[in-house]
Amino acid sequence: MDIVYRDMVTGAHQEIALQQIMAHLDSIRKDMVILEKSEFSNLRSENAKMKTELEQIKNRLLEESQKIRADTKLDINLERSRVIDMFTEHEKKLMEVSSEFHQKNAEIESSAIDTIKKIDIEVASLKTLLESLKLQTIRYLAVCIFSCLAVGLGVYRSWN
């Protein structure tokens, strides 16, 4: 029983221990409040410093981005005008080459038509010449045959 009683606390002792713990907790709370106030003010001042630095960085970033944006717009506009100029130059060259091509094509077609006409004329003249030569050959043959017949008749008459 003595052992069990030693482990047990009376109500008065328990009340005293509770008040001591409460006093100790109050002193810890006061220390925490003081610490919190001093630390909170430090954190608040650091936060304010960080905000101002952040605003400065933000302003610098905005200025830099606007500067880069302006430079980029200028570069894009310059490149666009250069490309437009190059395109119009190529278009002019293309029109010149196209007109030269059509002119050469027309010249080639007219020369081909002239050549075809010349060939047709030569073919027609050759056909005419061939026909006239055929006719002459037929005449010569007819004359030869009639001459041979006449000579043959003359020889036949003279033998008879």
Image (cartoon, rainbow, N blue to C red):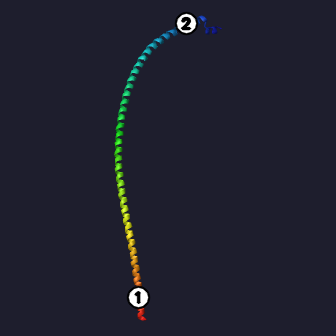
Instruction: Please say if the residues under marks 1 and 2 sit with CB atoms less than 8 Å apart.
Output: no
Quarter that holds the N terminus:
top right
Instruction: Mark 2: give few (<14), some (14-19) or many (20+) Cα within 10 Å.
Output: few
Residue 88 placement (x, y as % from top left): 35, 44
Residue 61 placement (x, y as % from top left): 38, 28
Closest to the observer, 46 or 94: 94
Residue 129 placement (x, y as % from top left): 38, 73
Outermost residue to the right: 1
Up/down of 124 relative to 85, above or below: below
Up/down of 55 relative to 16, above or below: below
Which image quadrant is residue 79 in? top left
Closest to the observer, 99 or 38: 99
Instruction: Mark 1: give few (<14), some (14-19) or many (20+) Cα within 10 Å.
Output: few
Q: What element carries label 2?
A: helix
Closest to the observer, 85 or 37: 85
Q: Say how many tags the image has.
A: 2
Quarter that holds the C terminus:
bottom left
For badge 1, the amino acid type reads Ala
Label 1 or label 2, whichever lies nearer to me, is: 1
Closest to the observer, 112 or 1: 112
Q: Which of marks 1 and 2 is nearer the N terminus?
A: 2
Residue tagged by mark 1? 150
Residue tagged by mark 2? 19
For badge 2, the amino acid type reads Gln
Name the residue rendered at 43%, 15% in the picture.
41
Name the residue rendered at 52%, 10% in the picture.
25
Up/down of 139 relative to 126, above or below: below
Which image quadrant is residue 63 in? top left
Which image quadrant is residue 72 in? top left
Distance from Cα at disc 1 to Cα at disc 2: 178 Å
